[in-house]
Structure formats: C-alpha cells, structure tokens
Amino acid sequence: MAKVFPFVFILLWSSAFITTKPIVDNSDPFAALAFRFGLVALGFFLFSIYTKQKILVNKKNFLESFFSGVLFHGVYLGGVFYSISKGMPTGIAALIVTLQPILTNALSGPILNEKVASKQWIGVFLGFIGASLVLGFDVGSKIPLDGLVATIIALIAITSSTIWQKKLSNNLPLSVSNMNQALGGFIFHIIVVILFVEPYINLSSTFIIAMSHQVFLVSFGAFTILMFLIKKNSASKTVSIFFLIPPTSAFMAWFFLNESLSNLDLIGFVVATIGVYIATRD
C-alpha cells in the first residue's frame, strides 16, 4: 500500500495549483491561509481526540512540530499565495519552487549526513529539465519584484522545512504532529494579517469549493502522505517526486480546464518521469 503513496501525493498536490488562483482572486492570501489552517488544525484535533491520541506533549516535541508548520504552512505557502496574488505567473512561481530538490540534495549531506549518490544528482537534474520544459519558462513575462522575492523565500522555506522535518526528534502520532504544524501555520498567518494586511474573504461558491479542495484533499490528504514519506525515506529521495508535480498539474489543467497541452509538455513529462525514477530507485 505504501508504494502507491508517492503517486497519490503527486495527484493531490498537483491539483492544488488549479485551486490556488480562485482562492487569491476572492480573498487576501494570508486571510485565506489563516482560514484554511484554522480548519485544518481543528480537523486534526478532532481526529486525534477520536482516535484517543495524546494531545498534550512535551515542550520540545510541540515546538519542533510547530516551527515546522511555520516554515511549511506559513512562510512557504504564504510566499507562493502572495506572489500569485501580486501577478507572478503561476508557471514561473512553480518553476522556482521546483528547485527545492536540488537545494535539498545539496544540504542533505552536510546537515543530515545523507549520502547523495551521483545517480540521484543525474535524476534530479533530469527532473528539473523535464519540469522546465513543461512549465515553459517565459523570460518575456512580466515578473513583479515583490512576487519574485516572495517565491524565493518560499523556496528556502520549503527546503528548510523538509530538512527540519527529517531531523525532528519526536515520535508523535502523525495526526498530533500535523495538528501542531497546522497550528503553527494558522498563528503565522494571523500575525501577518494583524500586522500587515487588511484581510477580506469573499465567501463565493468558487472560494468555498476551492478552499474545501485545499483543506480536505491537500492539507488532510497530500500533506499527511508527505510527512509519512519524509519519515520513512531519505529527504533527498522524497523531494525528488516534486518534479512530477508541474507536468501532472499541466495534465490536470488540460483535462479539467481545457488548457492546451503541447508536444513539448509531453516530452517534459517523460524526461521528468525518467529523472524521478533514477533519483528515487535504490
């Protein structure tokens, strides 16, 4: 069963790109994310109670999970949502964030003492080339400076969060750990809303559908699978599957939104798939 988790994760995580734009079109990005992770934290809390998990944990375990959530749900997603709300082309934002496996590979050795084999590096670069072909890096697109900075910060945050998650010393139940991480993201966005923005949310049917998708399928589903994969595998191998997210998103946009799918997209998908296979196989 665990062998199918990477494929399920790719499908669920890729689908999030389709629903991000409708959310930021109907709300302030930080208010939307505070709303999302407030619901997620509550959901994991209720699930932990239902399954009789120990909610109150020691300070160290709580802070480790909480800080991981600040990085991942707070800084990373906040950066991505903010950049898109400022007019950053979604494809270019996704391409920048897709550099994550390269950074993770580079840092896994000195920080986690993981051995990154040469074949993993070959797979990583093939994966990036494939993702780049699919996304079609358009240098002619207007790239807002604040959006670019936010995306780079998001890249650093998701890389740091992945490595940090692998270094966690606790053995908390997954639902409790996810609850604490969601709480970290919620508080981060609440602080941003209070200090820096004028929050608004248009509770239109479009927003509700898109937000429901991100809460239930992405936060409850995909993120839980990702935490499981990081715990069971090396960080460098786990994040290599992220290269399949841009091409899978392109296929979903073609299927659900009638967006065009070129021969170059298909080639990129094949190249990225080969790269991920090389990077993740034993």
Image: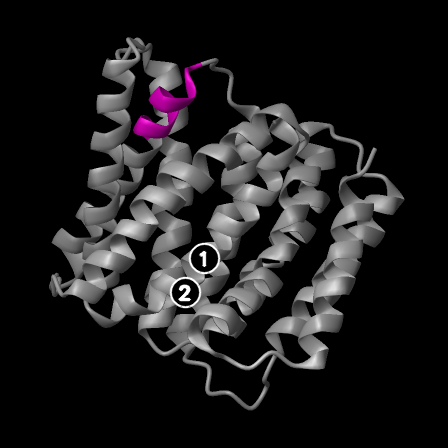
Stretch of the chain drawn in magenta:
172-180
Q: Determine whether the residue tagged by mark 2 lies in a helix, strand or loop.
A: helix
Q: Determine whether the residue tagged by mark 1 lies in a helix, strand or loop.
A: helix
Tell me the number on the disc at residue 184: none
Choose between 278 and 15: the one closer to the eye.
Answer: 15
Q: Give above or below for 202 relative to 40.
A: below
Q: Give above or below for 136 relative to 271.
A: below
Q: Which amino acid type is shown beneath numbered disc 2?
A: Ile
User: Within the magenta stretch, is there residue 176?
Assistant: yes
Residue at position x 44%, y 67% in the image = 149
Residue 163 % position (x, y): 57, 35
Question: Which residue is at the far right?
Answer: 118
Q: Quadrant of residue 108?
A: top right
Residue 260 % position (x, y): 55, 82
Residue at position x 34%, y 69% in the image = 21
Q: Mark 1 = which residue?
A: 15
Q: Give above or below for 260 relative to 146.
A: below
User: Within the magenta stretch, is there residue 190?
Assistant: no
Q: Quadrant of residue 269?
A: bottom right
Q: Quadrant of the C terminus?
A: top right
* Secondary structure mostly seen in the magenta stretch: helix
CA gap between label 1 and label 2 equals: 6 Å
Q: Left or right: where does residue 8 sit relative to residue 21?
A: right
Disc 1 and disc 2 in contact, CB within 8 angstroms? yes
Evaluate whether residue 62 shows in this view.
Answer: yes
Evaluate whether residue 187 shows in this view.
Answer: no
Q: Give above or below for 92 relative to 167.
A: below
Choose between 268 and 161: the one closer to the eye.
Answer: 268
Residue at position x 28%, y 8% in the image = 52
Q: Mark 2 = which residue?
A: 18
Residue at position x 62%, y 78% in the image = 136
